[in-house]
Amino acid sequence: MNEEDKARPVVLLAIADWQSRALIRAQLTEDGYEVRASTSVEDALRVLLRGEWPDLAAIVVEISQGPVDERLAHSLDSLKTSAPVVALTGAFGPSPAELRQMGVQTVLARPFAVGEVSSALKRLSIV
């Protein structure tokens, strides 16, 4: 890791769809973030619990299923770190109120532009 990488805020993406993950990753990288990717909230949780990424500035998770089930709620609750959580949801995903009760700071519902993820991080002072 070079000096430039150390200065860039680290963002964890937990997004199942490879195309969405690639587009958001490219935008965040262009905007100056170091992006680490996972294909699910559960996979991200396993990595975080092992302590592999202690330097996270933010976590961006995709939650596209219906109401938050107990397993997902537990996963989100376990992700609570000092890093803020931004949730990306679909039309039939959990409500913003449900997600905020679990510690999610920002909710973006589809359709949203890729740049809105970066804007959400900037509003959270993750620059």
Image (cartoon, rainbow, N blue to C red):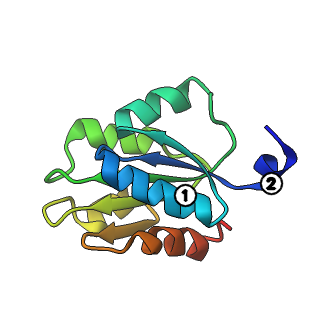
Q: Position of residue 61 (x, y in %)?
A: 39, 51
Which label is found at residue 1?
none
Q: Nearer the viewer, mark 2 or mark 1?
A: 2
Badge 2 amino acid? Ala
In the drawing, does residue 16 fall left or right of residue 44? left
Q: Pointer 1: what residue? A: 84
In the drawing, does residue 91 fall left or right of residue 103? left
Q: Position of residue 51 (x, y in %)?
A: 62, 27
Is 80 drawn above or below residue 114 in the view shown? above
Q: Secondary structure at mark 2?
A: helix
Residue in the image at 45% along x and 33% along y = 45
Q: Residues within 10 Å of mark 1 (few under 14, many from 20)?
A: many
Residue in the image at 51% along x and 57% along y = 26
Badge 1 amino acid? Pro
Q: Pointer 2: what residue? A: 7
Do we see residue 94 in this rendering? yes
Residue in the image at 73% along x and 55% along y = 8
Q: Nearer the viewer, residue 57 or 16?
A: 16
Question: Marks 2 and 1, Cα distance to the nearest angstrom?
Answer: 18 Å
Q: Nearer the viewer, residue 97 or 126?
A: 126
Q: Of label 2 and label 1, which has the lower sequence position?
A: 2
Q: Quadrant of the C terminus?
A: bottom right
Q: Position of residue 101 (x, y in %)?
A: 36, 59
Is 117 drawn above or below residue 9 in the view shown? below
In the drawing, does residue 73 fall left or right of residue 60? left
Q: Secondary structure at mark 1?
A: loop
